[in-house]
Each structure stands twice: as C-alpha cells, then as structure tokens.
Amino acid sequence: MRASLAAFFVLAAVAISRPLVEQWAPVGPGAGADPAPAHRYAPPAEAVQALRAGECDRALAAIEPASPDARVVAALYAHACGAHGSALQRLRSSADYTGPLADWRLWALGESAGVLGQPETAQQAFTALAGEFPASPLAGLATAAAAEVALERGDHAAIEGLVAAGRAAALSGETGARLEKVAWSAATQRGDPEARRESARRLLVEHPLTAAELEVIDIFRAADGTRSTGPACSIPSSSCAAPAAFSPPISLLPPSNRSTGCRRRRATRNGGCCAPKP
C-alpha cells in the first residue's frame, strides 16, 4: 500500500501541473509500444488533491469513469485508500484492460485480494504480473510476493517455478532476500536437504542478515563443530570462488564459537576466531 500511495503522490504532482485530460505518458512495462497513443485520462486536480488529503470518498467521487484508464485509476485510488473491497470489484471489472497501468492493476489486485483473504486470487495476480510484464519495476516484487503467498498455500510446485525465475532474474536486495527466505522455508517443509543447502549458500553469500535470522549456517555444522559448504558451490559469485575456504562473518556464528579476546575478529574454518596479525 505504501508503494501505491507513493506512486499516486507522483501522479498528483503531474495532474496538478498539466491539463485535466492530456496524453498520459505510459509508466507501465508497455511504455513506448504504442507508436501513436491516444489521449490518456489524467485524474482531475480535485481528485488528486483529495487523495493527498486522505479524503478518499471525495477523490473517488471526482473521477468520472468514462474510459478504461479512468476506471483503472479509480480502482487504484480505492486501493491506495485501503478500500480493498471496492478496489477488488473495480479491478476485476477491468480484467481486459491493456493500457499503461496494466502492471499496477495486477499489483493492486494481488494486494487487495490478499488483504481480503483470497490468497489464490492474490497469487494468480502476482504471478501474472511477473510473467506478463517482466520489464515492469514491479516484476521482482511480484515474484517475491507470489512466492510468499504460494508458501502460505503450500503450493510447492509454484514456489519452485517462482524461485527459479527470480534467481534467473538475479533479484537482489530485500526482494531477493524475501525470495530466498521462501526457498529456504519451502525446502525445509519438503524435507529436501539439497534444496536447503542451495538456498543456505545463496543466503550466506548474498543475504547474510537474513541468513543470520534463519540460522542457516547450522546445516553446515557437523557434530564436532566443523563446517563445510559441500563439494561445490553453485552460486556464480567471486565471493564463492573457493568454497572450501568459505567463512561467514563472525556475527553469523553462535556465541559459543566466538572468542571474547579478539579485536576486529573474523571467523575461521573450524568455527573459532582469530585476531589479525600484528
């Protein structure tokens, strides 16, 4: 919802400074696909100002849904206001919409359906967004969101496809961490040790904070306290060039394996700690 509100605040500035009906520059994944776009609907300044003031009823009343773009904008306004029942109804009635806000329509549909306890619809909407609009700035978020909903539903077949797609797209940052967290949780639920190790490697290398939260390092620990990342590393990263020497930061080690006498400590292969050379 915060992302939706931010987008509409940008839209507000545009609508206030331009004519009420003008050519709306596409912001969705199909931008530039139409060589001679028709005049697009821009919401009235009254609607934009009302939305910024949090007066959702007045904002929606000011929009005349006379075109497909206008109807989708009204639905997105309802979604941004938290009126998810109204938003879901409006978004579903625009199922055949193919304009510049098609990716946003699917995002709002997924979020509203999730809030209203319709996870299957939410998963379908997020999956459609990620699959049909891979160039959209929302595609990565939709992949992670679809995987999270699929995990809640126990849809492991869908999770495998979404995780594979997200890894192929090299999702990074918080979005990538969310996806790998789903991969780890799903592999744990399935009891799939190989999938768990693969996800753990990726978490340790790419998302160490999430790895610490999930304590994934424990699966590499033998009974004697030593660790191994396995015979090979499948992550295409320079930090994984020598898996046998892999050592996570000391912060990822449990307290029992940290030495209190070290300054500027670093982890060692046997789970201990050593001070830097003088």
Image (cartoon, rainbow, N blue to C red):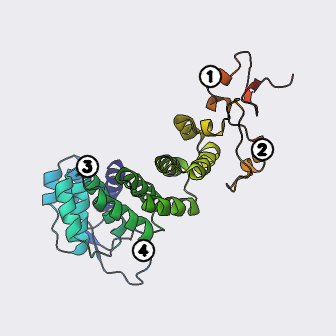
Camera-nearest residue between 76 and 118: 118
What amino acid does circle 2 point to?
Ala
What amino acid does circle 4 point to?
Gly
What is the spatial separation of the Cα atoms under label 1 and label 2, in whole angstroms? 23 Å
Q: Farthest residue in the right direction?
A: 278
Q: Is residue 110 visible?
A: yes
Q: Are marks 3 and 4 in contact (CB under 8 Å)?
A: no
Q: Are marks 1 and 2 in contact (CB under 8 Å)?
A: no
What amino acid does circle 1 point to?
Pro
For label 4, the residue is: 30
Q: Farthest residue in the top direction?
A: 261
Give the left or right position of residue 77, taking residue 142 as reference.
Answer: left
Name the secondary structure under disc 1: helix
Quadrant housing the C terminus: top right
Q: Which of the 4 image quarters holds residue 42?
A: bottom left
For label 1, the residue is: 255
Camera-nearest residue between 46 and 188: 188
Give the left or right position of residue 8, taking residue 238 as reference.
Answer: left
For label 2, the residue is: 244
Return the disc, 1 or 3, that comes first in the chain's sequence: 3
On screen, residue 106 above or below 80 = below
Give the residue displayed 66% in from the left and 35% down from the top: 221
What is the spatial separation of the Cα atoms under label 3 and label 2, in whole angstroms? 55 Å
Q: Are marks 1 and 3 in contact (CB under 8 Å)?
A: no
The mark closer to the camera, 3 or 2, is 2
